[in-house]
Image (cartoon, rainbow, N blue to C red):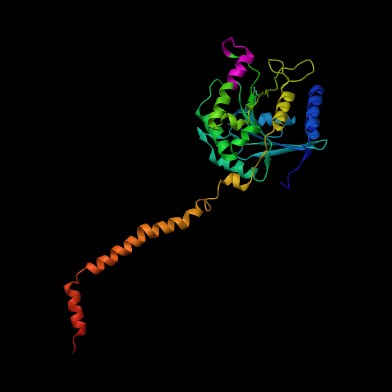
Amino acid sequence: MASQVIREWMGIQQFPPATQTKLLELLGKLKQENVNTLTILVMGKGGVGKSSTVNSIIGEKVVPVSTFQSEGPRPMMVSRTRAGFTLNIIDTPGLIEGGYVNDQALELIKRFLLNKTIDVLLYVDRLDAYRVDNLDKQVVKAITDTFGKEIWNRALVVLTHAQLSPPDGLNYDVFFSKRSEALLKVVCLGARLKKHDMQGSTIPVALVENSGRCNKNESDEKVLPNGTAWIPNLVKTITEVVFNGSKAVYVDKKLIEGPNPDEKGKIFIPFILALQYLLVVKPMVRAIKSDIAKESRPAWELRDTNVAGRKF
Ligand code: GDP
Ligand code: MG
């Protein structure tokens, strides 16, 4: 971390003035509440638009985006400051490879995050996917097993490729809510979340369109088919997660390594030894002693004794 270069957030100036005003207002709100640093972790399957979303938020091409290749194996943190506020975004490699959760990638992510605080998790997937399956559940389970259920109190689901015409003439907002509902169900299943785990709130969902061909409104802001200017909306949803009353997740050694296996069950060792002595060793010694007592001495032993006792 010491070598991490924190640059001025110049990319913000790439946004149209209307977006800049809204973003600076949101940063002002965070600072007002003494939130001077935000660390956002971006996770999800490969190819869903994680890196593109990082670039869109920062307003610069800071992480590589790949159409066909799989992503680099390592997480990458990008840090930018603006008027005393620091934004850290951590892009991660996709968690699925060859149809399975990529444990090696997960391990690298864990190590990278050691001693960092995750303020918000962006769980990224595509809006234009019509099904959820077991792999989605596996990814959510892997994230939950790594950071604990609490991470979902600090999460928002981000759906990319949001500039789409829904199939079968479905209304855009109806399609969006059906897709969100299906994904949130999988998140709750994969994370084994119950109502009380979420402290009464549901995980918010934000839409993203990273394509350069995204439609714009009269203020030159990138907008979704339902008219929402998605960049300020995404940042607004992120700040709502920060203020939802839940705790940020600090990644310490204990969290990523789980309970120390050396410590596990140590307390039971004296009881187990005592039980072993009473139930196994003691009866065994008793049995051996009684066997010896009962045993008639073999002829050869008697003979040997006689030989030993004979005088020559
Ligand atoms: P990652 O593997 O999750 O990091 O995904 P990338 O950001 O590398 O994106 C994978 C491909 O999807 C690239 O070709 C991107 O240009 C494309 N892509 C990402 N987000 C969007 C989006 O919102 N809309 C469209 N049309 N393409 C996207
Ligand atoms: Mg990527």
Q: Position of residue 140 (x, y in %)?
A: 56, 32
Toward the viewer: 54 or 298?
298
Residue 89 image point, x, y percent: 70, 36
Q: Is residue 78 above or below residue 272?
A: above
Q: Residue furthest top?
A: 169
Query: Can you tell which quarter of the image residue 279 is in?
Result: bottom left
Q: Out of 305 and 87, give the one closest to the viewer.
A: 305
Question: Residue at 24% across / 69% down in the picture?
Answer: 293
Magenta extent:
167-180
Q: Is residue 173 magenta?
A: yes
Q: Count of labels shown?
A: 0
Q: Is residue 248 magenta?
A: no
In the image, residue 209 above or below residue 249: above
The majority secondary structure of the magenta stretch comes to helix
Q: Position of residue 229 (x, y in %)?
A: 73, 20
Provide residue 136's location: percent of width, then percent of height: 54, 29
Q: Quadrant of the C terminus?
A: bottom left
Asked if residue 105 can be seen in this view, the reply is: no
Q: Residue at x 82, y 25 (%)?
A: 21
Q: Inspect this view and state whether residue 239 appears.
A: yes
Between 100 and 310, the one lying in front of the other is: 310
Q: Nearer the viewer, residue 80 or 183?
A: 183
